[in-house]
Amino acid sequence: MHHHYRFERGTRYYEIYILPNLFCENDMITVHGRIGSKLGRVRIKPLNEQLINKLIKSIKQRRINRGYKEIMLSGKT
């Protein structure tokens, strides 16, 4: 399962990646920071299949409530 979501608000961005790890499980990687800066924060959280959709939905709603706009990415799977 591969997913990539990106949200932007002014000069800020927030990204979510769902990628398989070496143990055939999924990890959620979140990245956020300032657009154009090399600084930012990366977090990796192991997930089970049951939590993935629930957690993505929750994060998307939180970003929208905080004024972020979801950016459509080409090649989204």
Image: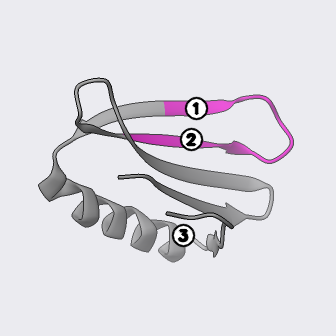
Residue at horizontal 48%, vertical 43%?
30
Residue tagged 1: 41
Q: Is residue 55 left or right of residue 19?
A: left
| Front residue of this view, candidates 71 and 61 | 71
Query: How far apart are labels 3 and 2 at the CA level?
Result: 16 Å
How many numbered circles does the render carry?
3
Badge 2 density bin: few <14, some 14–19, many ≥20, Cα 10 Å: some
Residue tagged 3: 66
Q: Position of residue 57 (x, y in %)?
A: 33, 70
Query: Is residue 39 a member of the stretch shown in magenta?
Result: yes
What span is colored magenta in the figure? Answer: 28-42
Q: Secondary structure at mark 2?
A: strand
Q: Is residue 46 left or right of residue 3?
A: left
Residue at horizontal 72%, vertical 54%?
12
Confirm or deny contact between disc 2 and disc 1 (CB under 8 A). yes
Badge 1 density bin: few <14, some 14–19, many ≥20, Cα 10 Å: few
| Tag in front: 3 or 2 | 2
Query: How far apart are labels 1 and 3 at the CA level?
Result: 18 Å
Query: What amino acid type is highlighted by mark number 1?
Result: Arg
Residue tagged 2: 31
Q: Position of residue 4 (x, y in %)?
A: 52, 56
Q: Is residue 55 left or right of residue 3?
A: left
Q: Looking at the rendering, which quadrant does residue 53 occupy?
A: bottom left
Q: Which numbered disc flags the more N-terminal residue, 2 or 1?
A: 2
Q: Secondary structure at mark 1?
A: strand
In the displayed image of the protein, which residue is found farthest to the top?
22
Query: What amino acid type is highlighted by mark number 3?
Result: Arg
Q: Which numbered disc flags the more N-terminal residue, 3 or 2?
A: 2
| Tag in front: 1 or 3 | 1
Position of 33 relative to 40 (above/below): below
